[in-house]
């Protein structure tokens, strides 16, 4: 069969150029423009990469129109309700779900590697009180290469898989320490008896020599949030990881760059904005006023946690979290004014023409913000939670980059609009 192509005509010259069409297993076809410049002498322009596929990938598939999200072919609802975050992590890193025995071994390996080098504590000591945990986390992950200088050969699959497991295992410990140090709280070491998510909550909330009661629903809620964040195709932080990886930097540096990219309020900071907005609204009586502001074309106010660039029907992750939120509310008898405000906003937005016409549904951040608040997780830790969830995705994407035949360094071009050559005055 003849290869499919798309023909581009240069209207200035009438010259025609053919570009190959690449076919995915599912999703839109992709035009290969890698020879566009050498063939036509022109660059293409795609601000924000809204129409550009930057890599071949077998990890995550999203259909925003249908509200579909899959990791390695498994629907997100199946993974989030039937599998743990650690099983999902294994799936992302090793391309298949673990059987019982494999999961046991993987879980033990992650537990054993969850401790950090004692010398790293000096690094945490150096940060001033109230330093943002995301800054400490990025520095801590970057510093891993200085404390663990064995297994740093990024061309050896055994060694980079070692690094991969190490990052996944240590991120929650570094994340919890980032918070404890920022607040001047005593350090809590990982507990080998506890599972991945339980251990993180314990390190965040515990106190030395005292028992802390963690309810199964709290662990389940956070574990689900981790799973729902585990990967999301070529988003900004994942793209940062791949771009840095394309220079042959090691995974610790790549993950640190992902953390920095995720810190921005347009990415990992959105669920924190949801809670800050609910606090600003202040009471159920004020909701109507703020809904009117959100609908006013002359007002820049937007309802945080509503709408999504990719999901234009519904966000499948939000549907799952809505159920978890309901379970949490009934099991923990939660009844806060913020929840009441959130409920009223959700009810209005789901029935109001303005939001329906524009496909503005609650997104994952709306529910994750409310759930994290109910789990008593401090707001400055919300983005950190996102990092813990997204780490296996970043690493899976890095591994995929490594496993390609050859890595091409990421080097986009530009539309130059600066001055033409100026004549210097001597
Ligand atoms: N509240 C009120 N109106 C909104 C909202 C909102 N949250 N979001 C979009 N709109 C309106 C716009 O004003 C616009 O109206 P118009 O057609 O009358 O001009 C219309 O809906 C389309 O909006 P766009 O900005 O074009 O939609 P886009 O897909 O570009 O934006 C975005 C998506 C950025 C997420 C937007 O919906 C938004 O700002 N939401 C609030 C912030 C938020 O929750 N971000 C987290 C996203 S999820 C994530 O990143 C994990």
Image: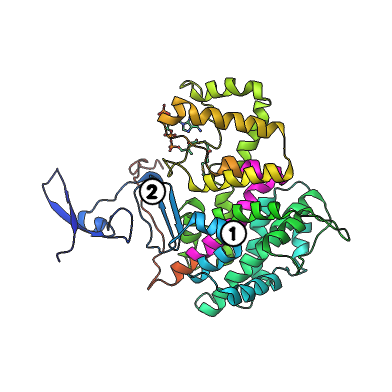
Residue 369 on image: x %, y %: 63, 42
Could one spot residue 4 in this view of the protein?
Answer: yes
Classify 10 Å Cα crowding around label 1: few (below 14), some (14-19), many (20 and above): many
Instruction: Please indicate whether residue 166 sits to the left or right of residue 406 in the image.
Output: right
**Considering the numbered disc 2 on the image, is that residue within a helix, a strand or a loop?**
helix
| Sequence-wise first label, 2 or 1 | 2
Instruction: Please indicate whether residue 8 sits to the left or right of residue 29 in the image.
Output: left
Does 353 appear above or below 242? above
Instruction: Please indicate whether residue 100 sits to the left or right of residue 61 in the image.
Output: right
Residue 322 on image: x %, y %: 58, 43
Residues 64 and 276: in front is: 64
Please name the predominant secondary structure of the magenta segment in the image: helix
Residue 373, image quadrant: top right
Does 186 appear above or below 294? below
Mark number displayed over residue 256: 1
Residue lying at the far left of the rendered structure: 14
Point 83% across, 53% down: residue: 185
Quadrant location, the N terminus: bottom left
The question of residue 80 being in magenta is answered with: no
Point 10% across, 47% down: residue: 14
The question of residue 394 being in magenta is answered with: yes
Does 242 appear above or below 319? below
Mark number displayed over residue 49: 2
Point 68% across, 33% down: residue: 338
Could one spot residue 269 in this view of the protein?
Answer: no
Q: Are marks 2 and 1 in contact (CB under 8 Å)?
A: no
Q: Which residues are magenta?
A: 369-397
């Amino acid at each position: 069969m003849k290869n499919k192509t798309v023909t581009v005509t240069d209207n200035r010259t009438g010259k025609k150029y053919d570009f190959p069409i690449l076919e995915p297993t599912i999703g839109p076809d992709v035009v290969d423009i890698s020879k566009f410049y050498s063939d036509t002498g022109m660059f293409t322009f795609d601000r924000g990469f809204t129409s550009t596929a930057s890599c071949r990938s077998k990890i995550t598939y999203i259909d925003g129109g249908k509200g579909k999200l899959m990791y390695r072919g498994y629907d997100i609802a199946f993974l989030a309700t039937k599998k743990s975050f650690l099983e999902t992590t294994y799936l992302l890193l090793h391309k298949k779900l673990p059987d019982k025995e494999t999961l046991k071994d993987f879980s033990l390996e992650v537990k054993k590697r969850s401790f950090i080098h004692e010398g790293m504590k000096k690094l945490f000591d150096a940060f001033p009180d109230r330093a943002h945990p995301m800054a400490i986390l990025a520095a801590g992950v970057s510093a891993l290469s200085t404390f663990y200088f064995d297994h740093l050969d990024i061309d050896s699959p055994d060694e980079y898989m070692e690094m991969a497991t190490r990052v996944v295992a240590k991120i929650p410990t570094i994340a919890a320490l980032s918070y404890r140090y920022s607040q001047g709280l005593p350090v809590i070491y990982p507990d080998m008896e506890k599972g991945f998510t339980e251990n993180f909550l314990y390190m965040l909330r515990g106190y030395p020599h005292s028992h802390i009661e963690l309810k199964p629903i709290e662990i389940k809620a956070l574990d689900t949030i981790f799973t729902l964040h585990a990967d999301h195709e070529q988003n900004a932080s994942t793209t940062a990881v791949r771009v840095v990886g394309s220079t042959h930097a090691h995974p610790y540096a790549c993950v640190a760059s992902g953390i920095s990219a995720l810190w921005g309020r347009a990415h990992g900071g959105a669920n924190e904005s949801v809670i800050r907005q609910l606090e600003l609204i202040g009471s159920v009586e004020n909701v109507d006023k703020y809904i009117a502001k959100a609908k006013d074309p002359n007002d820049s106010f937007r309802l945080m946690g509503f709408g999504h660039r990719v999901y234009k029907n519904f966000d499948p992750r939000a549907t799952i979290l809505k159920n978890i939120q309901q379970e949490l509310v009934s099991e923990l008898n939660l009844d806060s004014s913020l929840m009441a405000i959130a409920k009223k906003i959700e009810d209005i937005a789901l029935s109001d023409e303005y939001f329906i016409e524009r496909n503005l549904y609650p997104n994952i951040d709306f529910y994750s913000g409310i759930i994290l608040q109910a789990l008593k997780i401090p707001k400055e830790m919300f983005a950190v939670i996102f990092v813990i969830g997204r780490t296996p995705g970043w690493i899976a994407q890095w591994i995929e980059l490594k496993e390609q035949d050859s890595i091409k360094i990421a080097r986009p071009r530009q539309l130059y609009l600066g001055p033409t050559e100026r004549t210097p005055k001597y």
